[in-house]
Amino acid sequence: MHLRILVIKSLFLWFLGMNLISNFDIKLISLSVFDLTGNPTLDRISVRESNYELQVSVGDKIFVFGKAKGTLDKIKVGMNVLHFAQVAEIEGNFNRFSKVSWKKLKDGSIQIFSSYEPWPHSLYWTVYADGQLKMEASGPPENFKNVRWLGLGFDYPEQMLNQVSWKSASSDFGQWKNSNFVPMANPEIEFKIANQGFFQPIQSVKLEFETVTLDVSTETSGVFLSLGEDQNQNLLLPKLKTDLAFFFNQPIQNSELLPQTPSATSPSRQISAVNPLVLWFLFQ
């Protein structure tokens, strides 16, 4: 009888101890997820570097950049890989690659820098701890002479894109469905099928691939999204060389008067007011 009571007490103490340990583990996990103010902490960013590429990991995302020219080559979200590759050659003009480098910023973000001539003189990809990706392309005003359209293009497996929806600065909405979408298609097999596309002004856009969704927004006014072959394309619009491109129109020319005197007859000189092309990417 005493032995039975002793066994029951032992089991009870063991069960109580396991509960205490479990509760303690939960608290530890909570402390690792929340900071002292009760706000969620951001995921830690890690970098793996090889001779050919730079892999930046944050949360369940891995961004792969080519070290040859600093281009975004592909993204992994969870177990899903999307070959969404930046094309080094700019849309609308010819450029020449100059250099590439990367560094860790004070806030822990990772920044990849590349330079081209004549544009973009500075192209930055920044990976933030919340999983967002920022691209900023800019160049000195003198690099924009005699250029009507500039843009950056991307290639992707066309058969894996289901649909695209967008919103413009005037709050107009639009949607485009890919007639060449093939569920469970092999991304290594390319389909070169002419697909009627579009050329639209955008403020934000959602690209829905089979396994990954990409949301893109811009801080730059006058940005256009071009995709596929627009059957009604105006000859004044740029010819698309990649699967998808973000364009902006010729920079606005502002006249800045030189210091005037009563006898001044010098003509005013033109300077370019150029804003950088800024795009935010969120892969989910």
Image: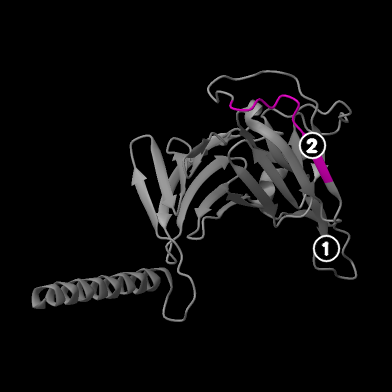
Instruction: Please state if 135 lies on the left or on the right of 273 as rendered.
Output: left
The answer to whether 66 appears left or right of 48 in the picture is right
Q: Quadrant of residue 158?
A: top right
* Residue 135 vertical placement versus 4 (above, below): above
Would you say the residues marked 2 and 1 are in contact, meaning their CB atoms lie under 8 Å apart?
A: no
| Sooner in the amino-acid sequence: mark 2 or mark 1 | 2
Residue shown at 79% from the left, 36% from the top = 176
Q: Label 2, secondary structure: give it.
A: strand
View extreme (left): residue: 3
Which of the pair 122/204 is nearer the observer?
A: 204
Evaluate whether residue 140 shows in this view.
Answer: yes
Horizontally, residue 67 falls left or right of residue 96, namely left
Would you place residue 158 above or below residue 118 in this image? above
Q: CA distance from mark 2 to mark 1?
A: 46 Å
Q: Secondary structure at mark 1?
A: loop
Q: Percent position (x, y) of residue 4?
A: 13, 73
Residue 253: give x, y in percent of width and height: 81, 52
Q: How many marks?
A: 2
Residue at point 54% right, 50% down? 124
Quadrant for residue 260, please give it.
bottom right
Residue assigned mark 1: 257
Tell me the magenta residue range.
174-184
Q: Residue 168's spot in the image, x, y percent?
A: 82, 51
Residue 76, x across and y down, in percent: 48, 41
Asked if residue 181 lies in the magenta stretch, the reply is yes
The kind of residue tagged 1 is: Leu
Q: Which residue position holds label 2?
A: 176
For the N terminus, give its image quadrant: bottom left
